[in-house]
Image (spheres, rainbow, N blue to C red):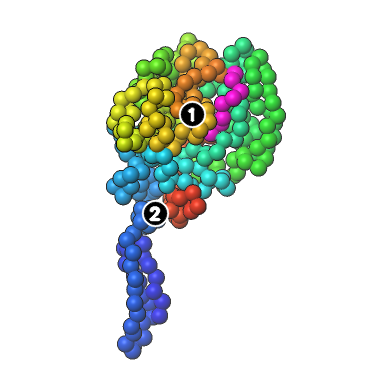
Amino acid sequence: MTVTWDRKLWAPVIQGLSEYKTHCDLYFREPTFSDFLIACNDDKNAAECFLENASLLPEESAYDETTDNNLRYIGANPNNYVSFNGELWRIIGIMNNIDDGTGTKETRLKIIRDESIGKYSFDNTGEYGNNDWSSGALQKVLNEGAYWNRGSGECPYGNNGAVTSCDFSAIGLTAEAKALFSPVLWNLGRSSTYEDVLASMFYERERGTDVYEGHSTEWIGNVGFMYPSDYGYATSGGSTTNRETCLQTSLYNWKNFEDCYSNDWLNRKISTWTLTPLNSTIVFHANVNFVNGSHAYSTYVDILPVVYLKTNIRIVAGEGKKENPYILSLP
């Protein structure tokens, strides 16, 4: 006699019963969020399954209440780890209405590398650097250069064309990882102010058409960075300043509200580049406790690559914990 568990039916399946009386004991536990994700694999992709089972994560997820109503992981350390590229990445959220580059809108999982791949300039052109991601030097490293090819080469480091050697032969993208994501349209709208900008305002401006003269409003490609709004919507707030109040506070002024930045897992305790420009040369970055900007040539800002997984990706194992991350697979 064999007993197996049908995850879709959430019931035991017994085979090989003898003609004699058989007695066995089955012990049950409450299904976890991971159980439901894995049970979805027969007919649903991971993004759909996350959305359907979001109520199982009341302390770890929240809708951003934007026009796209994306589901975000929130809090100081949610269980949103995935094994990707042979290392730990984390799920930013389940993002709706993502353009695949052809005008088709899809729901996709958006993931970010858990640790920095180094500190490099956003761009090294001219005196201050170019903050247009579509033509920036770092964009080329991540999407066609050393990082993309899992090799070594030169990375932008300073102004007036300055570079430094960079070696991604151990941490660059593998062929297996590339098979799990595909290009999307990344919006490159700017925010021309910063001290007064809420997460919701950043979200609108990121997707707007206001850019510095001659700069692109969008870019179709594979590897990018998070947006300032991603950083803002990842907070859960705390007992003194709750999430609603944090989201009604400009991200620049979060430095005065510890509950906002300390309960935000995208606060990596480092400065990390985002895609969003301020003016002709400054790019926003998520600082230790607020969002600020630096010239594109700056060399002290860390790199956390971001990709959008393909729509048919499945979660086939894991619990989303750092010690037991979700395992991704194609059907």
Amino acid type at circle 1 is: Val
The percent coordinates of residue 269 (x first, y second) are: 50, 33
Is residue 47 visible to us here?
yes
- Which residue does the image show at 45% across and 56% down from the upper left? 317
The percent coordinates of residue 85 (x first, y second) are: 56, 45
The percent coordinates of residue 174 (x first, y second) are: 60, 44
- Bin the neighbour count of mark 2 within 10 Å (Cα to Cα): few under 14, some 14-19, many 20 and up: some
Identify the residue under disc 1. 288
Residue sitting at the far bottom? 20
The one nearer the camera, 306 or 187, is: 306
Task: Write the start and end of the magenta stretch as one range.
Answer: 297-304
Q: Is residue 91 magenta?
A: no
- Which residue does the image show at 45% across and 35% down from the upper left? 266
The one nearer the camera, 113 or 37, is: 113
The percent coordinates of residue 243 (x first, y second) are: 32, 33
Question: Along the horizontal axis of the image, is 279 left or right of 153?
Answer: left
Amino acid type at circle 2 is: Ser
Q: Secondary structure at mark 2?
A: helix
| Rendered position, 83 above or below 67 | below
Dot in front, 1 or 2: 1
Q: Secondary structure at mark 1?
A: loop
Q: Which quadrant would the N terminus be assigned to in this image?
A: bottom left
* Quadrant in the picture for residue 35: bottom left
Identify the residue under disc 2. 34
| Rendered position, 83 above or below 138 | below
Question: Along the horizontal axis of the image, is 50 left or right of 216?
Answer: left
Question: Along the horizontal axis of the image, is 248 left or right of 154?
Answer: left
User: Predominant secondary structure in magenta?
Assistant: loop
Q: Is residue 302 magenta?
A: yes
